[in-house]
Amino acid sequence: MNSKDRILSDLRAQRLPVAELPSLVQAWTRYEDPSAQFTSLVESVGGRVARLASRGDLPAALAEVPAFVAAQQIVSGVAEIVGNVDLARVDDPHALEMVDFAVFPGEFAVAENGAVWVTDERVSHRAIYFITQHLALVVPVDQMVHNLHEAYARIALGTSSLGVFISGPSKTADIEQSLVIGAHGPRSLTVFLVG
Amino acid sequence: MNHAPLAAEFVKDRPRAQWHDATLWFVRAKRDKAAQSLPEWETLRDCAAQIKAHTQYRLADYLEQFEREATKRGAVVHWARDAAEHNKIVLGLLRNRGVTKLVKSKSMLTEECHLNPYLERNGIEVVDTDLGERIVQLAGEPPSHIVLPAIHKKKEDVGAIFHKFLGTDEGATDPNYLAEAARAHLRAKFVAADAGLTGVNFAIAETGGLVVCTNEGNADLGVSLPKLHIASMGIEKLIPRAADLGVFIRLLARSATGQPITAYTSHFHGPRPGGELHIVLVDNGRTSIRANEDFRRSLNCIRCGACMNTCPVYRRSGGHSYETSVPGPIGSILAPAGDPAKFYSLPQACSLCGSCTDVCPVKIDLHHQLLTWRGELGRKGLISWHKRLGMKLGSFMFRHPAVYRTVGTVARKLTPWLPRSLVYNRFNTWGRQRELPEFPAESFRQQFKRRSREQQR
Amino acid sequence: MPTVGLFIPCYVDQLYPRVGMATVELLEERGYRVEFPTGQTCCGQPMANTGCTAEARPLAERFLELFGKYEYVVAPSGSCVAMVRCHYDEYLAGRPGFEELKAKTFELTEFLVDVAKVDRFSRRFPHRVGLHQSCHGLRELRLGSSSERMVAHYSKAEKLLRMLDGVQLVPLARADECCGFGGTFAVAEEAVSCMMGDDRIHDHESAGAEVITAGDMSCLMHLEGLIRRQHKPLRVMHLAEILAGDKL
């Protein structure tokens, strides 16, 4: 018998009491002003939120982000911003090591925890979300859910190899519980809420 | 091995033990605040416990469903009955692809399997990329906490380790400076690696996907640069539905560090284009724990570490005093299941205060299981002879009220007359730092009897 | 007049008779007849908690025999009551009278609040009091809300103490951390046990307490042992003593 069959047959030989799944339809927390909740959560984890009237305001808004202004290599996944590194033409993600700034669309935002959902569905190298020195995500303000239960209800998991909730910049508190922003991944995260 | 002397050694440096206690209490306090922010906290705990109980009940079915779905999405699923088989599978995958450099993100399972030394013996360079894990790896120590691996290290210790291995300035202790040095050091390792290995926080049967939570983004970097991603997981990491993640992700980071969510909560389904994803499902004793009605619930653990942060013993004795890959209350249940003779002292390293049970996001009755373990160890003959003898004598005395009364009277009358040096002798462990109670002339029952007689008169 | 079977823990019987007498006074003044079954000794918790379940079993059996006949069983100890209510199942499940015994066995403050419905004391205790929440009363019997659980705050001991004139409850930095007694733990893990005790004492001291009170004398015995060795001005008193009108 191979290990799989052995494990499964051992498990099946045990008789456990019947236990049903709970209903996840509950009165989960909703917020009066979800975007205000989202903003305060992102700020509490070291990120920044900027509110834009339309996507057309993106270039002007980014022009005020120091990391963007100083960036040498820029990758953009949004039409309004022109980058100088084309992801689709990069064969090996290792080449992205020198990217200073990346800006991408986020599918939706979660008020409860300040997270933005992104996937690698239209992104040829998922490493870009993590290897860039600075990251900006652009999310329509009407794409905001209150809590994670609503979030999972709208995600179709399995359609892309990676889907990730990003909440704030990369961080660590592994040295004496002192918070340090910029552990391995982006040193800053800016979320543009549009609309 | 025995917890008490190692704990005593840790407590001997009182200021350091106090610092350790306060640091972890700070994390517990952050957890309280985060939990308070959700009025449905207790409902979430109930749901989590029910989902886990259900998953255990149908574990074989869900494992098969998971394998089917994961395979459909291009992953390769491997099954390992024990640590040795797991390690062999991982080494095989690396060897077949000529991998010599592996980056790892946090995985308590690989700690449990002692994967690192095994791979190193076989010529693989293994780099733990979580900053805390890298610190202890460089120091040549195991992690002392499952979420905060280097929580026992002060910044001066980290500074000294980094000075030696990363060439940081001598005496430098600024966490920002040290973390920046680690960033540069580990970026080079990420770029050079031929494969990335991650642990797994949750595996979804319905979709065949894996969820990995980190704050640093190290798991994501490690599996997005090289082509090979290996994910090692215990078979208990399964959950039935994607929707169940709503419950667990809400509980996990809040319980662990008091954050509303980790910076990165990554859902992997199949390999990335041109890459490979191998998932190793490991039993290593879990099936036999599941067979036991009392200890089964310990497999519901989601490794948030909250029971460690709240445990008054763990906070004051340090993770290394447990000498096991998972320390603290949950580790004290899991470790003796693997080797009761070796870890017999862990269920006793507990004042049975029950704080762990109340803090646990999946409602594991930790302190009751620790108590059950004590009975189990007693039946296995793994209780020290003097404890057993004391309890036998005690039980005899308490079954014979006359003996009990006489012993009590003699002790109460005699002790006050004995010279202090005799009472506080070297076998009187109580009296090392504590006074004995003042012995009253009369017991309660004598007073009560006298009072009843007087009232009748 | 309802009769209460008085359950006095062995170490209270031998070492803290006043706590027992204060319990008797509190019950009698509320109109209960108090009987003390003299065959009682110990509930068996030390044996059970050490893993010597075979040694604990006969004591559990004795307990049921001795106390089964009473309308109520009351003890000035959350820990010993928790042994009966939460841990006797292993020894007595299915025995006639056992379920009834569990339902009628109460810790003192719980009995005063829930059964005797005490809502006032005409007594004074004009002192700054540190309330130590003994773990088994708190987390096994739920005599109060533990800080880990997100439920509305309550505490039966606090409710009773606030009925006394002049009581000032001091706010602690850690509301319900264990004192480190833990039965044989106090000796088996002496170093950690004493550090836990020191830390609790320090918390009460910093909060300005004159006296530490608790529902379990075992916690207080451990804390008092440390306090006396270190010659601190702090005192300890069982809740029953304070409620019965004893002076500091």
Image (cartoon, helix red, strand yellow):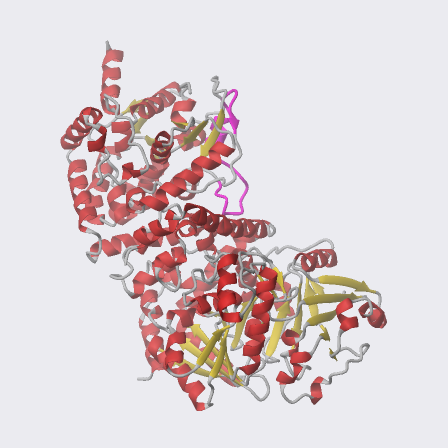
- Percent x, y for residue B328? 40, 56
B266 vs C218, left or right, is: right
- Verify whether residue C168 appears in magenta: yes
Q: Look at the image and tell me whether residue A19 can be seen.
A: no
Q: In the image, what residue occupies the spot 48% across and 80% down?
A: B102
- Verify whether residue C11 appears in magenta: no
Q: In the image, what residue occupies the spot 25% across and 16% down?
A: B452
The rendered magenta stretch, by its main secondary structure, is classed as loop
Q: In the image, what residue occupies the spot 36% across and 31% down?
A: C224
Read off the magenta span: C145-169
- Percent x, y for residue B275? 55, 86
Q: Quadrant of residue B177?
A: bottom right
Q: Quadrant of residue B421?
A: top left
Query: Which quarter of the image is occupied by the C terminus of chain B?
Result: top left
Vertical relation: C196 (above or below) A50: above
- Percent x, y for residue B319? 40, 57
Of residues A93 and B254, the one drawn nearer to the viewer in this rendering: A93
Vertical relation: C33 (above or below) B262: above
- Percent x, y for residue B163? 52, 66
Vertical relation: C187 (above or below) C27: below
Of residues B10 and B24, the one drawn nearer to the viewer in this rendering: B10
Q: Residue furthest top?
A: B457
